[in-house]
Amino acid sequence: MTRRVPLEIDGVVRWPDADAAAFRAEGYWADRSVPEYIADRVGAQPDSTALIDGDCTLTYRQLWDRSSAGAAGLTRLGLRPGDRVVVQLPNGWQFAAFLLACMRTRVIPVMAMPAHRRSELTHLAILSDARALVVADRDRDTDLRAVAQHVAADAPSVEFVVLHGELSSGPTGVAEYSLADCLAAPSGGDPVDGLPLPAGGDVACLLLSGGTTGLPKLIVRTHDDYAYNILACNETSEFDSDTVYLGALPCSHNFALACPGILGTWFAGGVVVLLATPSPRRSLEAIEAHGVTATAAVPAVAQAWIEYQREHHVLRANSLRVLQVGGSRIPDELAARVEPVLGARLQQVFGMAEGLINMTRLDDPADVIETTQGRPVSVADEVRVVDERGEDVPEGAPGRLLTRGPYTPRGYFRAAEHNSRSFTPDGWYGSGDIVVRRPDGNLVVAGRDKDMINRGGEKISAEEVENFAYQVPGVEMAAAVAMPDPVLGERLCLYVTPASGADVTLDEIITLMESAGVAHFKIPERLELVAQIPTTKVGKIDKKALRDDIRARLSRATPGA
Ligand code: OOB
């Protein structure tokens, strides 16, 4: 069979030909696009339920038809294969239909997070050279229409905004179109029947990296690699047509999208139930009402669900079989409480938008499930644990994680300089995690070697926050570090040395970051003013000393904590 030809897009780093050929020969890459796997289900079970979003229930056929309408809508808007659009939509059927529409027309969605604001969206639009932004009109009390117009003004490539919700009433800088119109069925037939199918090598989406240096990088996920990611996760999480998956975390994140997430559920022919947020009451009620069998949470969310269940006993029917927890390290004590309280098997997931997904297996012994972050989902995943010089460390010793495989891309989009730091010359991606590999192959995340704060699964680049702090008058030196937190695992503490005589307050820093339009979760929650910030022998800020310092200060403030 002749292989389909992918669009060439400037700035995409591909796997070397020999590796790609091997992945095809070994069957990891099938030259099929993500939507085709869902189309298989549409053919096989058109009338079974695919999605439940509040009052809106869609069968497989209806979900597909909405995405066909969306594909026609994208074409009417003038979007062409290879164009990028920044997508920031809340969980809902519109998100699902729009995403599939993009994939089917080879319009490339840049998967922004719901918490992102002007600063991040502008960066994403510029970096991806996006022609459009697709956003909701508001997120609670934030007017995202105004945010989108600001972004469009600052990102010259942006030609228009597609709005989920109400359009602006007055004149706007760039044109606004309605997402509802874009997703409305045009009259007559399947309008995209004649569309060429995406090639396996076509870009399915651009995911966001957790970001260790400044603003997020974009990760190119092709249909070949992303479909395989989904299939391998489905097998490991044992998703099948009986799966009822609750998407309560943001579905634009790799975890709830494809590990196995909503896409995995549709590949398997199951039902997806969507919620806008993982609030404990709504989530547990949705599990109970819809017979949810599997869902994903970050540790803080799992903890909130456990507490809510203990107090209110919402879950009675016990449909929940698997609770996946990942994004940040779940404390062992919390891990041990999942099954007794929620009645579901815990599956730890240590993954990354850059590829490699590790999971504990559902039938692993309790010790593995409760104290490790699992092992790769594919036999084709290569993992090395190395020291500073890149030499493999002995089994059981901590070291830096390096990985390579059929769904771990070889470079970020348009980031040549950064790529030379994050990837070795022979294609290994260094995730910046410090891990221990046990004799049974399971990995334990023991720390990290990247300047990032993991606030309950939300990743904050220290450098990005420091760059804002330096804009505050009187800040001579700034260092952002993680401080321990019982709920989120980590929160952000900012150390500052003020210029002599200057008076710097947390409020000033907050005001500056808010007016710069930075996502709220990145705003420091504590400020420590110090006479001097410790440095290492080579003159770099000694972040470890600062982390130890804040830990000591916190335990002096609350002895015994
Ligand atoms: C997931 O993906 P990202 O891209 O937001 O963040 C990846 C980073 C990892 O390098 C690691 O530092 C951290 O998040 N991480 C964990 C973890 N899961 C992710 N650290 C400790 N324990 C875990 N279980 O976070 C992600 C992507 C797909 C599935 C699940 C999580």
Image (cartoon, rainbow, N blue to C red):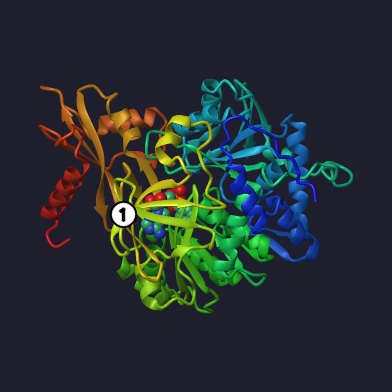
Identify which residue, 500 or 36, lies in the foreground: 36
Total marks in image:
1
Q: What quarter of the picture does the C terminus occupy?
A: bottom left
Judge: label 1 CB < 8 Å from ligand 1: no
Specify the farthest residue to the right: 188
Q: Which residue is mark 1?
A: 399
Identify which residue, 222 or 140, lies in the foreground: 222
Q: Secondary structure at mark 1?
A: strand
Residue 78: where, in percent of width, then height? Answer: 74, 29
Q: Quick check: 238 above or below 416? A: below
Q: Would you say 430 lies left or right of 269 here?
A: left
Residue 230 visible:
yes
Residue 206: where, in percent of width, then height? Answer: 57, 41
Identify which residue, 455 or 404, lies in the foreground: 404
Residue 542: where, in percent of width, then height? Answer: 19, 39
Residue 166 visible:
no
Q: Quadrant of residue 485?
A: bottom left
Q: Quick check: 59 above or below 128? A: below
Q: Quadrant of residue 177?
A: top right
Kindly identify the residue that appears in the image at 14 percent across and 37 percent down.
534
Q: Amino acid at mark 1?
A: Gly
Q: Would you say 328 lies left or right of 217 here?
A: left
Q: Quick check: 159 above or below 359? A: above
Kindly identify the residue that appears in the image at 25 percent across and 53 percent down.
484
**Classed neighbour count for the residue bearing mark 1: other residues with Cα under 10 Å, few (<14), some (14–19), many (≥20):** many
Residue 250: where, in percent of width, then height? Answer: 52, 51
Identify which residue, 104 or 506, lies in the foreground: 104
Q: Would you say 78 lies left or right of 512 here?
A: right
